[in-house]
Every structure is written in C-alpha cells, then in structure tokens.
Image (spheres, rainbow, N blue to C red):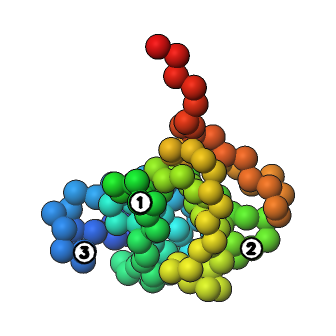
Amino acid sequence: MTTGKLTELYNFGKSAGGMGRNLITTFRQLNTSTLLFGSFPAGLHLVDLRHPSAVVKSADLPKAPSALQATPLCVREAINAPNFVVSGRFPSILLYDLRRGLNTCSPIYSGADSLSSMTVVSNDRVIAGGSYRGIIFL
C-alpha cells in the first residue's frame, strides 16, 4: 500500500505580502525537477522540486490594456523544449523560452477575450479555445 505525503510547495500570503487569497489556476511539470504553475493574482512561478519550499522564479503576466487581471488558465510544453506556451484570461498566447527566463515572452494575439484551453500540435501550430468576440443577435 502506498501512502502519500502532503507538502506545501509555496504560500503566497507569506512572501507576497498578501492576505493568502491566491488561487493556483494551472500547473505543469516541465521536467523531472521543474514545476511551473500559474496563479491568480500572482502570475507564473517556477519551483525546483528538489527544494520545494522555495520558488526559483516568479513573473507577472503582461496585461492587455482592457484586462483587469491577467490570469493563466492553461500551460503546455512546446514541441521544442525548453519552450512552453501559456493562455488564460487575456487575448494572447504567450510563448516562453526558459533559457531567457520568465520575464521575456513572445505574445501571439488571438482576437479572443479569454483562452481557456489549448494544445500544441507542432513546432509552429497551437490550437486554442475560449471566449471570442462575435456577432450578437438581439
């Protein structure tokens, strides 16, 4: 029989000066020792699983002028590692290269209000779904 152990990876309220009212909205294990998770309202965070009590890097997501809060909802690895893509409550898909850190990304504007799901098809193709502006019939 296998028993699990619950380990607190990170407490936003302690380090960010907040009230502890943060929500992990998505996460992805990028390799055997690296976990990437997105949170509201804090952004993106990399955790080294060999030292789970400390966040290695954190970054705010770039915000569109119309977005009150950019919240990551989906993280997927790109075909060519160490890249990954992020989508969420903002109108773009964000491409990150871990060699350049979390502070630099390439945005791909989608025209959507929010992108809640996504899959990587090939090195240059991503399929995303979400809330798009459309024709409203009254």
Q: Which mark is residue 65?
A: 1
| Callout 1: SS | loop
Residue ID for mark 3? 16
103 vs 93, left or right, is left
Name the amino acid type tagged 1.
Pro
Measured in 3D between alpha carbons, the distance from the residue under mark 1 to the one under mark 2, in whole angstroms, is 31 Å
Measured in 3D between alpha carbons, the distance from the residue under mark 1 to the one under mark 3, in whole angstroms, is 24 Å
Q: Residue 122 at x, y = what percent?
A: 83, 58
Circle 1 Cα neighbour tier, 10 Å, few/some/many (<14 / 14–19 / ≥20): few
Identify the residue at horizontal 63%, vertical 71% (top origin). Answer: 106
| Callout 3: SS | loop
Front-most of residues 14 and 107: 107
Q: Residue 94 at x, y = what percent?
A: 60, 64
35 vs 7, left or right, is right
Residue ID for mark 2? 81
Mark 1 / mark 2, whichever is N-terminal: 1
Tags 1 and 3 in contact by the CB under 8 Å rule? no
